[in-house]
Image: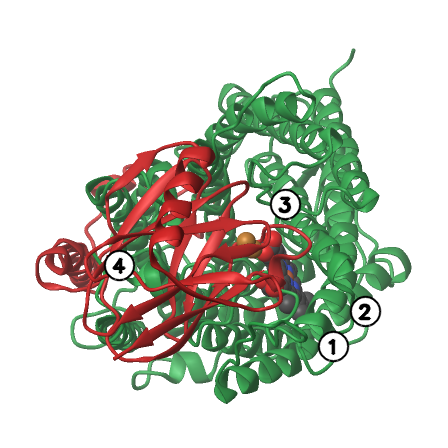
Amino acid sequence: MAVNRNFRTCPTTGLVFHEPAEKLMRWNAVVAVVALLIGGVLAIGVLLTRWQAVHLLQADLFYQFLTAHGLNMLVFWIIFFEMAILYFASSTLLRCRLATPGMAWVGFWLMVVGALLNNYAVLRGDSSVMFTSYAPMGAHPTFYAGLILFAVGALIACFVFFGTLVIAKAERTYHGSVPLVTFGAITAAIIAVFTIATGAIILIPTLLWSLGLIEHIDSLMYRTIWWGFGHSSQQINVAAHVSVWYAGAAVVFGAKPMSEKVSRTAFLLYIFFLQLASAHHLLADPGLTSNWKIFNTSYAMYLAVLASMVHGLTVPGSIEVAQRQKGFNNGLFEWLRKAPWGNAPFVAVFISIVGFGFLGGISGVMMGTEQLNLIIHNTLYVPGHFHATVVIGTTLAFMGLTYFLIPVLFRRKVAFGNMATWQAYIFGISMSGFSVFMMGAGTLGAPRRHWDISFAGNPFGYEFPATAWLMIALMGIFGVGALVGGAMYLAITVYSVFLGEKIQTPDFATVSAKRGMAPAPQPVAVGATGHGAGVGAWGMVAPGTFVLALVFLTSFVLYYFVNWKYLSTVWPLR
Amino acid sequence: MSAILPPTERVWWKEPLDRVELLWIVIALVWCLIMFFMMPYWHVYGQQNLANEAYKTSPEAFAKKADEVIAKYKVREEGPQKIPVVKPPAGSDVYLVARLWSWQPILELEAGKSYRIHLMSMDWLHGFSLQPENINIEVHPGYDHVLTVTPTAPGKFSIICNEYCGINHHTMISPLYVVK
Ligand code: HEM
Ligand SMILES: [Cu+2]
Ligand SMILES: [Cu+2]
């Protein structure tokens, strides 16, 4: 089979697309958006049921909707989109042909079949086990089989990605080291490989158990290994969306990473310290010692936290430097005031960074602290936390990237004028409110995954404090705002991709391996290389970002000790 | 030139750091260390730590012990299902059985006294969530988890289930009384 060497160059961005890679990116992105649509429709039912004033669905439907919402959002939407990102970060950014497109399609279709099979299982009604499917509560075998097929497909895609890196090196399509964004994607792919391996260790025996071939699955063993899979997969998301942040800073501002060394080391910390951090899901479990819990959450998790704190500084920092070099060098915050607040990818990435750090990051550390977990475990605080990480952090960043990709990848104009910008604001702000109020209700004890916290008709009722009810109502209102924002995203993307105004660009043409080589790098004039030379204050190139980082730290420290104070008031426990 | 292109300096790992980054890394690292030390610190000086004491056992063995305690210390029954209420002496071992979809027995404890409460599930995972205190603990089948708790003030409390355990999960609730 002849190797397809058809490439096209985007005239506005200079990005290079390989024909098969482009097709794969498009299909993965389209399927991702379909999953988001399904998950979003389900979110309507879930939200309007938890909002007790509405209480829309019956209990069985609610638990079924909730299971399907979790899976379609957390697994299918995010991972299909990440596959598109992997192909973009390898083939497009390295200007290289994609390795074995045929295998990539096999992977893609396995993922599609797996996702359909898993949805079928939930649709049957006998597999409302939530995405965590904690044994010994069992689902239909197709539930696990679907997830396994999906994971195998994703694994194949990771290897196609690695293969592309090898080809790029061999055909010398770039000089020196890979770009930072590609490096971040490599991090994500490496974590994905061992995540999927852990998933296999737990899901294959569970499948056999559901078929009656294995007698017993220990609940603690299940939770321990399952979270080795479940938590690491969240780290894939973090690595992916942090890469998208850097990419956003690069395309909107031409920003250069403040220091390649720091940013890359921070990515490496994710690889080294992630698997272990999954222990923070087991802090309220019996049978594991405190030493094990403390070691695994802090030694491991806090170094991953450190990495995120570093990225949280360097991305805005690099934007500040780029802005100052453009002349917005007055005072601490002119660079931020004069930022393009009408540019959709920028707004999405900006809210993603702030929301992920302030809401998702801080709350995550609270839950991940051995003793503090006692007053948080399994309350609404938990979904509040991860709607801040995986929705504001990951999903919103991906939405911003979509607005960049529609013209570049699909060669269509983003439809409906500046509705995309409004979408980013509405979705970002509503989702922030939604997460905050969910966490508030959780702090007051409201449980997650619960159909009726009024305990209507129960001989032993419990009445939650009025503030908890208020929090739930506010969660409902902001949740509706988030649904509107989500619907706007779907409307804009679907309309643009299928009906949007076409952009005429030069089409694919064959490029020989030799002509595809990157030009030899030009020696850079000494002096001009000094990054951010001559900007900033206090001997810092990004003093504004530093001040913002200190604000972040202050809220972090205060909130951390407030939680310890609260813990100290509950019943003594040994 | 930017994060989507290869680094301009080929030996980028030798580029010096800016003061912003260096300072921030040091600050963040110190903060991470403080957070680390808070946990062992609380084990020594704090009052709220989850017990490490747990035993593997069978549902039958656990239920048997629970029944013995109920037989000995039952004071009355409550609710349409006539769930036994037990008032065990301070310091004693009390067994709380979680099953689809109830908690048994109902406990009546004295404020200021300590009790060794054994938690275990007979079937699937459940969540022990004491309200309004908001103490939350995972309850496993096959693991007898022993907590020493000291109720602080009298009142009526509720144990709700906050680990999803199937279709009637939201009905799994039990009172817990603390008396003077
Ligand atoms: C459009 C706005 C969205 C709304 C209004 C919404 C609302 C909700 C609500 C009310 C719950 C139930 C919490 C509970 O009862 O425990 C929930 C659960 C969940 N949501 Fe969302 N959600 C939205 C978008 C998303 C997105 C984009 C993702 C992932 C990327 C996501 C992932 C999840 C997950 C993983 C769960 C947990 C399911 C479980 O506990 O098994 N959601 N969501
Ligand atoms: Cu339960
Ligand atoms: Cu339950």
| Secondary element at image label 3 | helix
Q: Earlier in the sequence, mark 3 or mark 1?
A: 3
Chain at numbered mark 4? A
| Badge 3 and badge 2 in a common chain | yes
Res. A361 image quadrant: bottom left
Q: What color was chain B assigned in the picture?
A: red
Q: Amino acid at mark 4?
A: Gln
Judged from this view, the residue extending furthest toward the top is A1
Q: Nearer the viewer, mark 4 or mark 1?
A: 4
Cβ atoms under marks 3 and 4 closer than 8 Å: no
Q: Nearer the viewer, residue A294 or B179?
A: B179
The residue pinned by badge 4 equals A371
Is A474 rendered above or below residue A90? below
The residue pinned by badge 3 equals A75
Looking at the colours in the rendered structure, which chain would you say is drawn in green?
A
Q: Earlier in the sequence, mark 3 or mark 4?
A: 3
Q: Nearer the viewer, residue A139 or B113?
A: B113
Res. A160 image quadrant: top right
Q: Which mark is residue A415?
A: 2
Cβ atoms under marks 1 and 2 closer than 8 Å: yes
Q: Nearer the viewer, mark 2 or mark 4?
A: 4
Chain at numbered mark 2? A
Residue at (60, 21) in percent of width and height: A514
Q: From the top left corner, tell me how far across and down residue A166 is, in percent.
A: 51, 21
| Secondary element at image label 4 | loop
| Badge 3 and badge 4 in a common chain | yes
